[in-house]
Image: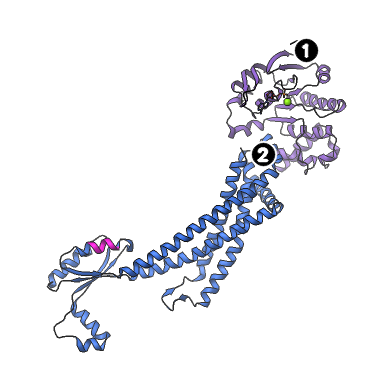
Amino acid sequence: MRLLRMFRRNVRDAFKSVSRNFSLSIASISCISITLIVVGLSLLLSFNVNNFADTIKKDVTIVAFLDKETTKEELENIKNKIQKMDNVESIEIKTKDEAKEEMIKESEFVSLTMPEENPLLDSYLIKVTDIEKIKDTVEEIKNIESISAINYGEQMVDKLISAFDLIQKITIIIVAILILVTVFLIINTIKLTIFSRKREISIMRLVGASNLTIKVPFVIEGMLIGVLGSIIPIGVIVYGYVVFYERMEGHIFSNIIKLIEPEPFIYFIALFILGIGILVGMIGSGRAVRKYLKV
Amino acid sequence: MDFISIKHANKIYKNGVTAIYDLSLKIKKGDFVFIIGGSGSGKSTLIKMLYREERPTSGEIIIGGLNVAKLRNSKVYKLRRKLGIVFQDYRLLPKLTVYENVAFALEVIGAKKEEIKTKTLKAIDLVGLKSKTRTYPTELSGGEQQRVAIARAIVNNPKLLICDEPTGNLDPDMSKEIVDVLETINREVGTTIIMATHDREIVNARKRHVIMLKDGRLIKDNEKGTYDNEIVENV
Ligand SMILES: Nc1ncnc2c1ncn2[C@@H]1O[C@H](COP(=O)(O)OP(=O)(O)O)[C@@H](O)[C@H]1O
Ligand SMILES: [Mg+2]
């Protein structure tokens, strides 16, 4: 009850001082808005990229070919051996006969030119649990005698992952810089409020207000700046994504990349943006309070 | 037991000025004490150490069993809730009415609404400003503003009221009024009062406990003292 009463007063005061220091507040709010739009875009991007990467990763298969001389028995033995490896999720045998049949089915040309003696090799189709460790697993399998060749479409996977990594790193740097600028602006906004209320603060201290009571109004003001700053970004990001999703009919580059469905995805993103806005506001005002209020 | 006990307190400011030198004194509960001395004699420094705005460089200051000298910054507010403090410049908030200024002291420590109302009205009544409850400080005389400050200082029923030159900005008539108000509080509520001043007339007229400082040293501690010209000039 008592907390609620003090909270209500603090929020009212926060609104007052945001409007009193209007130009600086607007600067802080705009800066936080820009930051949050970039944050929102990078969130949309990275969630979609992750979603896409996950679907690709599920499809990544190691194909390991065996020597020509491998017997049926060895084929089973090695299969069991690979099965027991750490990162191996599943393994399937594809015999040269199966491979031949598949090829013939797929193309008439092959069926005509395929010699009587099967030139193909027996192979394993292996799926891994952790795609990050696929290289180690491949090395391990390569070391088994009888394995003559191995491939897993490494370039495609590697390139994809490093491209996404780069995009993510760049956005993190941009966001970090924007957050720094925002925090700096918020510190200055709160500093003004603290100075304009110096007298009040000194009296509060004199009559025995606790440090928390003195600090909380300014932290609330910072949080209010954060909340006000996240309104436009949330609108832009939510509306933008829904429209984009509908325009693209749920996927980009024809059917290759599927977009995440807007609901409930965008609600989560909106909450995230709001959370970051409040957090940045709190950090900025917290710093200002520590610097300019020696309590 | 003495309410306030100061033992061998020294205060050396960062710039090297020694403002209080080996000060020891005792004040009883319910006492009315004048701290007197010329400008720069260390009155304000002593007062600041009492409400823990400054810390003594060495020695101890015990108020109601609490060693104020050792009090951590984060706990100072607990001491302040048990004290009332009044300054020469009133320190009121110009945008708040008399009532709001007094109630402010209770609001910021989170008191209940009914409690705030009864205590605030009582304090305003005690300083004789009942008719000015809704007035703003700028519409009041200096003496009235100081009475508002006193009401704010006593609104939470402190055991100790500390005043640093409360009459410093006031003419003799208003000064007398203020000291009358302080005496009323001392008599009726039993609040211990410490008042720093360099106003001879006030001190001589009241015959109260007088503590005299000169260059940071205690030079006189009389139960029923005066601001004796001879002593000031001879020491
Ligand atoms: N914050 C401070 N820093 C340095 N010196 C101070 C400070 N406050 C007071 N002094 C010095 O301490 C001495 C006592 O000052 P003060 O306690 O204000 O005396 P009074 O209140 O009796 O006039 C003076 O010499 C003054 O210059
Ligand atoms: Mg002084």
Q: Quadrant of residue A295?
A: top right
- The chain drawn purple is chain what? B
Q: Which residue is mark 2?
A: B109
Vertical comparison of A97 with B138: above or below: below
Tell me the crowding category of disc 1: few under 14, some 14 to 19, or many 20 or more residues within 10 angstroms, Cα based. Answer: few
Q: Amino acid at mark 1?
A: Glu
Residue range (magenta): A134-139
Disc 2 element: loop
Q: Which residue is mark 1?
A: B233
Vertical comparison of B34 with B93: above or below: above
The reply to whether residue A295 is visible in this rendering is no
At horizontal 71% and vertical 20% (from top left) the residue drawn is B41
Q: Chain of mark 2?
A: B
Distance of label 2 from label 1 (alpha carbons) = 46 Å
Residue A147 in the magenta stretch? The answer is: no
Residue A117 falls left or right of residue B223: left
Between residue B181 and residue A200, name the one nearer to us. A200
Disc 1 element: helix
Q: Amino acid at mark 2?
A: Ile
Instruction: Name the tint of chain A in the rendering.
Output: blue
